[in-house]
Protein backbone atom coordinates (compact mmCIF):
# COMPACT_ATOMS: atom_id res chain seq x y z
CA UNK A 1 0.00 0.00 0.00
CA UNK A 2 2.86 2.39 0.78
CA UNK A 3 4.50 1.77 -2.62
CA UNK A 4 1.18 2.50 -4.36
CA UNK A 5 0.96 5.71 -2.43
CA UNK A 6 4.44 6.83 -3.29
CA UNK A 7 3.72 6.47 -6.98
CA UNK A 8 0.67 8.73 -6.65
CA UNK A 9 2.16 11.38 -4.38
CA UNK A 10 5.23 13.34 -5.47
CA UNK A 11 8.13 13.86 -3.08
CA UNK A 12 7.45 17.59 -3.17
CA UNK A 13 3.88 17.10 -1.96
CA UNK A 14 5.02 14.59 0.66
CA UNK A 15 7.50 17.16 1.97
CA UNK A 16 4.83 19.86 2.07
CA UNK A 17 2.44 17.55 3.93
CA UNK A 18 5.18 16.79 6.46
CA UNK A 19 5.75 20.51 6.96
CA UNK A 20 2.04 21.09 7.57
CA UNK A 21 1.93 18.11 9.94
CA UNK A 22 4.77 19.61 11.98
CA UNK A 23 3.02 22.99 11.98
CA UNK A 24 -0.10 21.37 13.44
CA UNK A 25 -2.24 22.07 10.35
CA UNK A 26 -5.25 19.76 10.12
CA UNK A 27 -5.33 17.25 7.27
CA UNK A 28 -8.34 19.01 5.73
CA UNK A 29 -6.55 22.35 5.65
CA UNK A 30 -3.30 20.80 4.45
CA UNK A 31 -5.11 19.04 1.61
CA UNK A 32 -6.33 22.38 0.29
CA UNK A 33 -2.95 24.07 0.65
CA UNK A 34 -0.98 21.24 -0.99
CA UNK A 35 -3.69 20.54 -3.58
CA UNK A 36 -4.28 16.89 -2.77
CA UNK A 37 -7.43 14.91 -1.99
CA UNK A 38 -8.62 15.12 1.63
CA UNK A 39 -8.47 11.34 2.00
CA UNK A 40 -4.92 11.38 0.65
CA UNK A 41 -3.80 13.95 3.23
CA UNK A 42 -5.63 12.12 6.01
CA UNK A 43 -4.00 8.80 5.18
CA UNK A 44 -0.56 10.36 4.84
CA UNK A 45 -0.96 11.96 8.28
CA UNK A 46 -2.00 8.52 9.57
CA UNK A 47 1.19 7.01 8.13
CA UNK A 48 3.31 9.69 9.80
CA UNK A 49 1.69 8.94 13.17
CA UNK A 50 2.35 5.23 12.68
CA UNK A 51 6.03 5.97 11.99
CA UNK A 52 6.21 8.17 15.09
CA UNK A 53 4.71 5.35 17.14
CA UNK A 54 7.35 2.95 15.83
CA UNK A 55 10.10 5.40 16.70
CA UNK A 56 8.90 5.93 20.28
CA UNK A 57 8.06 2.36 21.31
CA UNK A 58 11.55 1.48 22.64
CA UNK A 59 12.22 4.43 24.94
CA UNK A 60 14.70 3.73 27.76
CA UNK A 61 13.52 3.61 31.37
CA UNK A 62 13.59 6.91 33.27
CA UNK A 63 15.64 7.59 36.41
CA UNK A 64 15.91 10.46 38.88
CA UNK A 65 12.95 12.69 39.77
CA UNK A 66 9.80 11.36 38.11
CA UNK A 67 6.22 12.62 37.99
CA UNK A 68 3.37 10.23 37.20
CA UNK A 69 -0.32 10.87 36.65
CA UNK A 70 -3.35 9.41 34.92
CA UNK A 71 -5.79 11.39 32.82
CA UNK A 72 -8.86 10.96 30.62
CA UNK A 73 -9.39 12.02 27.02
CA UNK A 74 -12.46 12.35 24.83
CA UNK A 75 -16.05 11.51 25.66
CA UNK A 76 -18.83 13.95 26.41
CA UNK A 77 -19.25 13.53 30.14
CA UNK A 78 -17.18 15.54 32.56
CA UNK A 79 -16.61 13.79 35.81
CA UNK A 80 -14.21 12.55 38.42
CA UNK A 81 -11.74 9.71 38.04
CA UNK A 82 -12.83 6.12 37.59
CA UNK A 83 -16.61 5.83 37.60
CA UNK A 84 -17.05 9.47 36.59
CA UNK A 85 -14.96 9.03 33.46
CA UNK A 86 -17.57 7.11 31.45
CA UNK A 87 -17.03 7.40 27.71
CA UNK A 88 -13.48 8.67 28.09
CA UNK A 89 -10.16 6.99 27.32
CA UNK A 90 -7.91 6.49 30.37
CA UNK A 91 -4.21 7.20 29.82
CA UNK A 92 -1.13 7.08 32.02
CA UNK A 93 1.88 9.37 31.84
CA UNK A 94 5.42 9.30 33.25
CA UNK A 95 7.57 12.43 33.07
CA UNK A 96 11.23 12.82 33.97
CA UNK A 97 11.76 16.31 35.32
CA UNK A 98 13.67 18.46 32.83
CA UNK A 99 13.41 15.50 30.46
CA UNK A 100 11.03 13.41 28.40
CA UNK A 101 7.53 12.10 28.85
CA UNK A 102 6.18 8.57 28.24
CA UNK A 103 2.49 7.87 27.66
CA UNK A 104 0.30 4.80 27.37
CA UNK A 105 -3.40 4.13 26.81
CA UNK A 106 -4.60 1.86 29.63
CA UNK A 107 -7.62 -0.38 30.25
CA UNK A 108 -8.10 0.92 33.80
CA UNK A 109 -6.37 2.92 36.54
CA UNK A 110 -6.02 0.10 39.07
CA UNK A 111 -2.83 -0.14 41.10
CA UNK A 112 -1.74 -3.37 39.36
CA UNK A 113 -2.05 -1.75 35.91
CA UNK A 114 -0.15 1.41 36.83
CA UNK A 115 2.53 -0.41 38.82
CA UNK A 116 3.26 -2.75 35.92
CA UNK A 117 4.01 0.22 33.67
CA UNK A 118 6.06 2.05 36.31
CA UNK A 119 8.24 -1.00 37.02
CA UNK A 120 9.02 -1.22 33.33
CA UNK A 121 9.56 2.48 32.61
CA UNK A 122 11.14 3.76 35.86
CA UNK A 123 14.43 2.56 37.31
CA UNK A 124 14.52 1.44 40.97
CA UNK A 125 15.40 4.02 43.64
CA UNK A 126 13.99 6.85 41.54
CA UNK A 127 11.96 9.53 43.32
CA UNK A 128 8.32 9.31 42.18
CA UNK A 129 5.87 12.16 42.75
CA UNK A 130 2.10 11.52 42.59
CA UNK A 131 -1.17 12.98 43.79
CA UNK A 132 -3.31 11.21 46.41
CA UNK A 133 -5.15 8.87 44.05
CA UNK A 134 -5.55 5.56 45.88
CA UNK A 135 -3.90 3.45 43.17
CA UNK A 136 -0.57 5.04 44.08
CA UNK A 137 -0.67 3.57 47.61
CA UNK A 138 1.24 0.61 46.21
CA UNK A 139 4.27 2.88 45.73
CA UNK A 140 4.68 3.19 49.50
CA UNK A 141 5.95 -0.41 49.60
CA UNK A 142 7.88 -0.43 46.33
CA UNK A 143 11.45 -0.01 45.10
CA UNK A 144 10.74 3.69 44.52
CA UNK A 145 10.91 6.69 46.87
CA UNK A 146 7.36 8.02 46.92
CA UNK A 147 6.14 11.56 47.60
CA UNK A 148 2.54 12.78 47.33
CA UNK A 149 0.93 16.15 46.65
CA UNK A 150 -2.57 16.72 47.99
CA UNK A 151 -4.46 18.75 45.38
CA UNK A 152 -7.32 19.43 47.76
CA UNK A 153 -4.94 21.52 49.87
CA UNK A 154 -2.30 22.84 47.49
CA UNK A 155 -0.94 22.29 43.99
CA UNK A 156 2.75 22.55 44.75
CA UNK A 157 4.99 22.38 47.78
CA UNK A 158 8.56 23.21 46.68
CA UNK A 159 9.77 20.08 44.87
CA UNK A 160 6.67 18.09 45.77
CA UNK A 161 4.40 18.62 42.75
CA UNK A 162 3.30 17.07 39.46
CA UNK A 163 3.08 20.29 37.48
CA UNK A 164 5.22 18.91 34.65
CA UNK A 165 3.01 15.96 33.71
CA UNK A 166 -0.14 18.06 34.18
CA UNK A 167 1.32 20.64 31.81
CA UNK A 168 1.82 17.87 29.26
CA UNK A 169 -1.81 16.71 29.58
CA UNK A 170 -2.94 20.29 28.96
CA UNK A 171 -0.74 20.57 25.86
CA UNK A 172 -1.94 17.23 24.50
CA UNK A 173 -5.62 18.04 24.99
CA UNK A 174 -5.18 21.47 23.43
CA UNK A 175 -3.53 19.89 20.38
CA UNK A 176 -6.26 17.26 19.97
CA UNK A 177 -9.14 19.71 20.29
CA UNK A 178 -8.37 21.16 16.86
CA UNK A 179 -9.38 17.83 15.26
CA UNK A 180 -12.97 18.01 16.56
CA UNK A 181 -12.89 14.47 17.83
CA UNK A 182 -10.31 11.72 17.41
CA UNK A 183 -11.51 8.20 16.42
CA UNK A 184 -11.05 5.92 19.43
CA UNK A 185 -9.24 3.33 17.31
CA UNK A 186 -6.65 5.93 16.27
CA UNK A 187 -6.34 7.65 19.63
CA UNK A 188 -3.12 5.81 20.71
CA UNK A 189 -1.40 7.18 17.59
CA UNK A 190 -2.51 10.74 18.35
CA UNK A 191 -1.31 10.37 21.94
CA UNK A 192 2.12 9.19 20.79
CA UNK A 193 2.24 12.15 18.40
CA UNK A 194 1.71 14.48 21.38
CA UNK A 195 4.42 12.64 23.32
CA UNK A 196 6.79 12.98 20.36
CA UNK A 197 6.08 16.70 19.96
CA UNK A 198 6.71 17.31 23.67
CA UNK A 199 9.97 15.36 23.64
CA UNK A 200 11.13 17.06 20.43
CA UNK A 201 9.81 20.63 20.71
CA UNK A 202 11.80 22.24 17.89
CA UNK A 203 9.93 22.20 14.53
CA UNK A 204 13.12 21.82 12.47
CA UNK A 205 14.09 18.78 14.52
CA UNK A 206 10.61 17.30 14.12
CA UNK A 207 10.71 17.73 10.34
CA UNK A 208 14.19 16.23 10.11
CA UNK A 209 13.08 13.20 12.13
CA UNK A 210 9.96 12.71 10.01
CA UNK A 211 11.99 12.76 6.79
CA UNK A 212 14.40 10.21 8.27
CA UNK A 213 11.53 7.95 9.37
CA UNK A 214 9.85 8.16 5.95
CA UNK A 215 13.14 7.29 4.26
CA UNK A 216 13.80 4.44 6.70
CA UNK A 217 10.41 2.77 6.60
CA UNK A 218 8.94 3.91 3.29
CA UNK A 219 12.02 4.46 1.13
Image: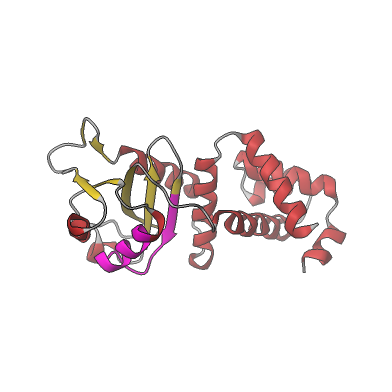
Residue that extends furthest to the top in the rendered view of this protein: 158
- Where residue 133 appears, as percent x and y from the top left, is 20, 55
Q: In the depicted view, which residue is nearer to us: 64 or 2? A: 64
Q: In the depicted view, which residue is nearer to us: 172 or 179? A: 172
- Residue 38 position by quadrant: bottom right
- Residue 72 position by quadrant: bottom left
- Where residue 34 appears, as percent x and y from the top left, is 77, 45
Q: In the depicted view, which residue is nearer to us: 142 or 213? A: 142
Q: Residue at x 78, y 49 (%)?
A: 14
Residue that extends furthest to the left in the rendered view of this protein: 153
Q: In the depicted view, which residue is nearer to us: 119 or 40? A: 119
**Residue 90 in sight:** no
Is residue 107 rendered magenta in the image? Answer: yes
Residue 10 shown left or right of residue 87 in the figure: right
> Please, is residue 110 above or below residue 133 in the view?
below
Please give the range of residues in magenta. Answer: 102-119
Q: Looking at the rendering, in which quadrant would you find the N terminus?
A: bottom right
Q: Looking at the rendering, in which quadrant would you find the C terminus?
A: bottom right
Q: Residue at x 19, y 45 (%)?
A: 148
Q: Residue at x 30, y 62 (%)?
A: 115
Q: Residue at x 80, y 47 (%)?
A: 13
Amino acid sequence: MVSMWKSRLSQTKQNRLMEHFVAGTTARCAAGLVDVNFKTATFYYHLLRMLICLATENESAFAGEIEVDESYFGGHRKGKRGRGAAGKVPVFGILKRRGKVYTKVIADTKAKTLMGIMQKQIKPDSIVYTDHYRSYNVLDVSEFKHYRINHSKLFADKQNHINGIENFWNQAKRHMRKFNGVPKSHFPLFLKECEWRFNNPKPKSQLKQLKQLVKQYMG
